[in-house]
Amino acid sequence: MPATRITTRQGWIGPRRRDVLEAVQRALVTGLRIPPDDRCISLVEQEPDALLLSAQASERFTLIEIVLITGRSLEAKRRLYAAMVEELAPFGLGADEVRVILVESPAENWGLRGLPASEIDLGFAIDV
């Protein structure tokens, strides 16, 4: 159910785009306990001059913004943050190069199948 956008500088991922997307998906499944086939992730690679970051940010700095239905526990969020760092480490990303921002929205603000998500069975628990 989450909608996830990965933003990073162009050039360092190369032909591993799909692998990065799958790594982020695994972290979402581990952290938020969503079904493995629940997928909505985009990867945006910006030209270096299209991102204004601190001088300490590396060339691989990666921002992961996740819009999700309100209700996850702090423990689920901790699992998610740790899983993101673990899953992205094989790509040469250190913990300080991964920033995760959660944007929570009430279920009635999600339109699914022509209805508010608050009125349908999502098929998984939100309050994990």
Image (tube, helix red, strand yellow):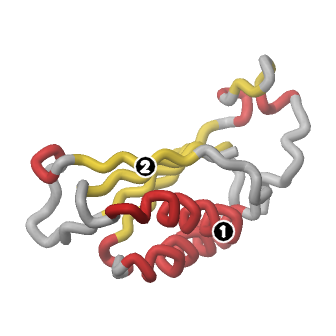
Badge nearest the viewer, 2 or 1: 2
x 78%, y 52%: residue: 126
Question: For this rendering, which residue is in front, 51 or 128?
Answer: 51
Whole-angstrom CA distance, mark 2 to mark 1, is 19 Å
For the residue labelled by badge 1, is the local secondary structure a helix, a strand or a loop?
Answer: helix
On the image, numbered disc 2 is attached to which residue? 43
Image position, residue 71 (x, y; %)? 71, 51
Question: For this rendering, which residue is in front, 105 or 94?
Answer: 94
**Rendered-image quadrant of the N terminus:** top right
Q: Amino acid at mark 1?
A: Gly
Image position, residue 110 (x, y; %)? 68, 29
Please give left or right for residue 103 compared with residue 1 in the image.
left
x 44%, y 58%: residue: 17
Above or below, 16 relative to 7: below
Mark 2 closeness class: few <14, some 14–19, many ≥20 residues within 10 Å: some
Question: For this rendering, which residue is in front, 53 or 15?
Answer: 15
Please give left or right for residue 120 compared with residue 71 in the image.
right
For the residue labelled by badge 2, is the local secondary structure a helix, a strand or a loop?
Answer: strand
Q: Amino acid at mark 2?
A: Leu
x 58%, y 73%: residue: 78
Mark 1 closeness class: few <14, some 14–19, many ≥20 residues within 10 Å: many
- Tell me the number on the disc at residue 67: none
| Quarter of the figure with residue 28 | bottom right
| Quarter of the figure with residue 79 | bottom right
Q: How many marks?
A: 2
- Tell me the number on the disc at residue 31: 1
